[in-house]
Image: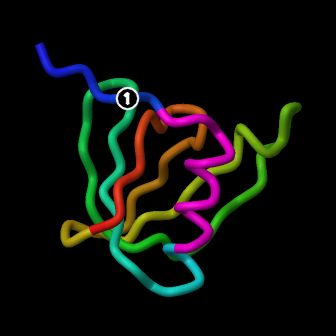
């Protein structure tokens, strides 16, 4: 069985911020076993504490814009 290494919140956030700044594509694996690929286009801060963990990540994929809660992201890979 191939278990993906779960990254910590700071590492995930740094990779997402870098994708936003450089318009670099990333591959995101979520806790519900979905894999999405695209470019991060922005963030929306959470409305309940902890705000940072609950921010929404906007990912522009080939199938359109996807909204992902940051706490549901298990792993981010640079493409």
Which residue, given by chain and number where applicable, does mark 1 sit on? 5
Q: Quadrant of the N terminus?
A: top left
Which residues are the magenta region?
7-18
From the viewer's perspective, tell me whether residue 64 is left or right of residue 73. Answer: left
Magenta span contains residue 33: no
Q: Where residue 26 appears, x then y in whole percent?
A: 35, 65
* Residue 44 in the image: above or below residue 50: below
- Most distant residue in the right direction: 49
Q: Kindly identify the residue that appears in the image at 29 percent across and 28 percent down.
A: 4
User: As rendered, which of 10 and 25 lies closer to the eye?
Assistant: 10
Q: Where residue 14 appears, x then y in whole percent?
A: 62, 60
User: As rendered, which of 49 and 7 lies closer to the eye?
Assistant: 7
Magenta span contains residue 13: yes
Q: Where residue 43 appears, x then y in whole percent?
A: 65, 64
Q: Secondary structure at mark 1?
A: loop
Q: Kindly identify the residue that appears in the image at 56 percent across and 57 percent down.
A: 57
From the viewer's perspective, tell me whether residue 47 is left or right of residue 33. Answer: right
Q: How many marks?
A: 1
- Most distant residue in the left direction: 1
- Most distant residue in the top direction: 1
Q: Kindly identify the residue that appears in the image at 72 percent across and 38 percent down.
A: 53
Quadrant of the image occupied by residue 27: bottom left
From the viewer's perspective, tell me whether residue 16 is left or right of residue 23. Answer: right
Q: Quadrant of the C terminus?
A: bottom left
Q: Where residue 72 appears, x then y in whole percent?
A: 50, 32
Q: How is the image coloured?
A: rainbow
Quadrant of the image occupied by residue 48: top right
From the viewer's perspective, tell me whether residue 78 is left or right of residue 1. Answer: right
């Amino acid at each position: 069985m191939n278990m993906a290494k779960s990254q910590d919140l700071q590492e995930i956030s740094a990779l997402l911020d870098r994708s936003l700044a450089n318009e670099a594509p990333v591959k995101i694996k979520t806790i519900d076993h979905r894999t999405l690929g695209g470019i991060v286009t922005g963030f929306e801060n959470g409305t309940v504490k902890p705000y940072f963990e609950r921010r929404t990540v906007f990912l522009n994929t080939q199938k359109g814009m996807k909204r992902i809660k940051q706490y549901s992201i298990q792993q981010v890979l640079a493409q």
